[in-house]
Amino acid sequence: MSNLLLRLKQMLLGWGTVGVIYNFSDSLQGEGYQLTPSVIDNLIAFSPSAVWLYLSFFLIVPLGYLSTPLCHLRWLARAMQLSALVAGVFYLLWPTTMQYPAFAQSGISAGALNGLIAIDSSQNCFPSLHAALTLLAVWAIAKKGSRWLTLMSVVWAIAIAFSILQLRRHLFIDLVGGALLASICGWICATCEKRKTQYE
């Protein structure tokens, strides 16, 4: 199997599993508990124009799969799968939602945001898989060992996180939960991969 096909296969297995679990849990969960915005959330003004940075998530995740060394490819897929499984448990047992802002703006950005709202879950807030997968992608990119690529991905991830709050798709506590989820699942999968390599 070629290098590219192997990467695409692992991306399908890893990222694809996230989509299945996300939508499956959304269809089975009950009414969500409404989260309260924090001081940080209230300091950030709502802006539909942030939708483009938010959607760039769909570029940084593939970049993680395409740039990480082959020896870490399986780790990335497994870490995303485990993150989705743990998040799915939260979504089913403790579904959360938030108060979403009403807006009557027109334009390309507002139209894109309306399209996003139409297909996204109004629940599944905590923990944020958007934040978790972004962090895992940056982690994978950093494993390449390129200082400038790592720095670029970190700045990009911070911008994505800020856009999530600007769009009111999640609250700050959701992002914290997503970051913790990615850190723990990434560490567990890295430890398992390391032990598996030692016994091979």
Image: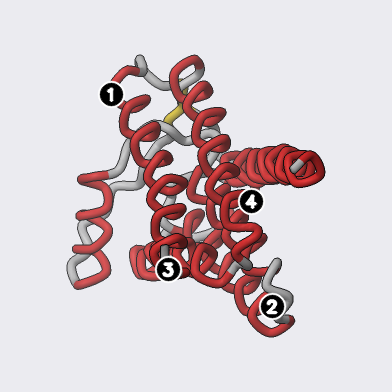
Q: Amino acid at mark 4?
A: Ile
Tag shown at residue 2:
3
As helix, strand or loop, the secondary structure at mark 4 comes to helix
Residue located 46% across and 53% down the image = 10
Tag shown at residue 27:
1
Q: Amino acid at mark 1?
A: Ser
- Upstream in the sequence, badge 2 or badge 4? 4
Left or right: 114 as drawn, with respect to 174: left
Pair 1/3: label in front: 3
As helix, strand or loop, the secondary structure at mark 1 comes to helix
Label 4 crowd (10 A; few <14 / some 14-19 / many >=20): few
- Upstream in the sequence, badge 3 or badge 2? 3
Label 2 crowd (10 A; few <14 / some 14-19 / many >=20): some
Pair 4/3: label in front: 3
Tag shown at residue 40:
4
Q: Amino acid at mark 3?
A: Ser
As helix, strand or loop, the secondary structure at mark 2 comes to helix
Quick check: can you spot residue 41? no
- Upstream in the sequence, badge 1 or badge 2? 1
Residue 157, image x, y percentages: 58, 65
Q: Calculate the distance from the C-alpha at mark 1 to the C-alpha at mark 3.
A: 37 Å
Q: Amino acid at mark 2?
A: Leu
Residue located 23% across and 45% down the image = 119
